[in-house]
Amino acid sequence: MPGPGSCGDIVAKVTGRQSTRSIGSVPTTGTDSMNAQGALRRRGPARRASYQDVLDAPAHMVAEIVDGALHLQRRPPMLAALAKTALSGEIGGAFFKGRNGPGGWWIVNEPELHFGEDIVVPDIAGWRWERMPEPPDEAYITLAPDWVCEVLSPSTRKFDLEEKRPVYAREGIDHLWLVDPGARTLEAFPLLDGAWTPAGSASNDDPVSFPPFEAVTFPLGALWP
């Protein structure tokens, strides 16, 4: 979940007397409006964001849309970026390249997923080859992955857990992993009867072997500098 260590995501929700600035034609608010988010969500954004707003977003920001609201976040802090890179290498080597593992997966960093009006960018996602024999030659993917992983940071944790996680459940994604570089933990959740159910957790340098990648084991310490 890309994001800075302190800035918070910029959310395209505006009403009343909030101070705003514009990203394209969508009004955006800063972190000073976080206490008003519940009321804003009930009233809805000034207008529903669209894919054009994602295309118009600044190049240094990651743009996502959930429930009509545009969320802009900076690239991840170094600890999160390192953890994502390391985990992608551990999973990708065994399940994408088939090195010391079974292969059979596409493993992609920061894919842009389009689910109707919602547009989300998980840190890492994976598709089984039998569900997606060939990757699409497009900038985004409409087929829900089989697995997603979010690397939590202070600025993205609330958005990842409260906004994006329900979208992943709604789309029927089978597995969700959450990595917290600050706490040095990894949690795994399969989707059972529409709800995320804990399958296990690891911390520090514990061995990691959780579904859907239980065919291999790697030390969680490989994710930390």
Image (spheres, grey):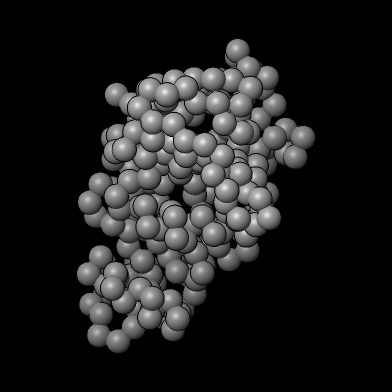
Is residue 42 or residue 209 the one in the foreground? 209
Q: Quadrant of the C terminus?
A: top left
Any part of residue 128 in sight: yes
User: Residue 31 is drawn in which quadrant?
Assistant: bottom left
User: Residue 71 is drawn in which quadrant?
Assistant: bottom left
Residue for point 66% across, 50% down: 192
In the image, residue 99 sits, relative to residue 107, either above or below, namely above
Residue for point 69% across, 35% down: 128
Any part of residue 111 in sight: no
Residue 184 picture location, percent across and down: 34, 33
Residue for point 49% across, 64% down: 66
Is residue 55 or residue 72 the one in the foreground? 72
Is residue 108 or residue 34 the one in the foreground? 34
Residue 105 picture location, percent across and down: 66, 30
Q: Is residue 19 left or right of residue 128?
A: left
Q: Is residue 43 left or right of residue 139?
A: left
Residue for point 47% across, 35% down: 201
